Structure formats: C-alpha cells, structure tokens
Amino acid sequence: MIEDIQAAIPLGFLLSFMIGPVFFVLLETSATKGFRAGVSLDIGVIIADIVFLLIAYFSSFQLLENLSNEPGLFVFGGMILLVYGIFLFVKKAKKKSNVKASKGTYLGLMVKGFLLNFINIGVLAFWLGLIIVVGPSLENNPNRMMVFFSTVILVYFGTDLLKIILAKQLKRYLTQERIVLIKKGLGIVLIICGIVLITKGFLPKEKFDIQEEIEKIEKL
C-alpha cells in the first residue's frame, strides 16, 4: 500500500499543472475573489474529476478483467496517452486575457468549476488511459486502486491549494511563452509514456519486463 501511495504522489502533482481553461480560471478567481472563492471553484473541478474517474473505472472494469495479462491492453492504453500527448503538444495556447472570473456565490463557483472540467472530454480520455495502464500493475485490486487514485486526487487538491494561495504570483510569472513550454513538456512526457507502453504491448514479456530490470539494478 505504501508503494502505491508513493507512486501516486508525483502523478497528483503533475495533474495539478495540466495547463488548461480551468487552470487560469482558478488563478483568476483566487487572485480577484480570495482564498474561499478559489477553493469553492476547485472543489467543483475535483468533483468533476471524481465523476470522470468513476465513469472511466466502471466502463473499463470488464476490459481490465479480460485483458489484464494481454499485451493489447498496453497498446490500447498507450494509444490513448499518445494521442492525448500529441493533442497537448500541437494545440495552440489561448490568450490568458480571454479567461475571466465571473461573479457568483460559493455554490455558483463550485458549479462553474464542475462544468468547466466536465465539458472537457479529454479529461475522461486521460483518466481512462491512466486506469487501463495502472490497473494491471495494481492487480486490478479495487482496494489498491482506491488507495492509489484517492492519493492522486488528494495530492492534486493539495497542490491546487498552494496555487490558490500563490495565485497572484503565479499569474505574474506565467507568460504566454512559459505556458506553451509547459504544455509542450507535458505533451512530450505523455507521448513518451504512450510509446513505451505500445512497445511493451508488441514485445514478448520476457524481453520487456520492467520489474525484472529493476530487480537486476537493485542487485548491482
């Protein structure tokens, strides 16, 4: 269980810096309306992620059960990550000035955060690909997957709280050029992960056993 938590922490941190409309609305709301407004908006975003995560899990559960030991699972999951990474890499960043925080109650901000995240179908595709990739390594165990993804969400939310506190400073340093570099960097990471998984799907297990290679390195 400790290993699952340790593996989930960097992923949750990375997800918090996936540049998109929600990212800028969160900064704008936090900088102009304060900490509570930012938290309210972020709670809505997190709820949407949890809904997408549940949809992805239950829609892929049977697939995971049937293909947990099949190379096709890695190819399928790798393709999703590869396509999503290419999308992030080639998509042009929108101007930050186009994103404004609107007036509303805390409940209204929560609903706004939920809708902003929920209308992005790419988020569902990302969670689906992640579950397909991570599921076999967690032995498709519901308890282990609960611990892993709960940790991801908690770290994600915790990092968002830091962004909310530092919203004014982050807005100042996030120039258009830096935003483009961050998006392309995240895209490259996902592309590499996708290619590695696709390659693993086509190679015999004995020729591409990551766990075996790790054990060899530990013995050195």
Image: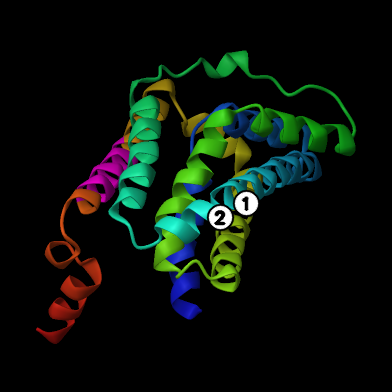
The residue drawn where x is 64% and y is 43% is: 52
Residue carrying label 2: 61
- Report whether 49 appears left or right of 177: right
Instruction: List the single residue furthest toward the left.
Output: 220
Q: Which mark is residue 192?
A: none
The quadrant in which the C terminus is found is bottom left
Q: Position of residue 43 (x, y in %)?
A: 74, 46
Q: With respect to residue 118, does 43 lie above or below? A: below
Residue carrying label 1: 58
The residue drawn where x is 36% and y is 34% is: 85
Please tell me which residue lies in front, 56 or 172. 56
Would you say the residues marked 2 and 1 are in contact, meaning their CB atoms lie under 8 Å apart?
yes
Query: Disc count in the image?
Result: 2
Please provide the residue range marked out in magenta.
188-199
Taken as a whole, is the magenta stretch helix, strand or loop? helix
Cα gap from disc 2 to disc 1, whole angstroms:
5 Å
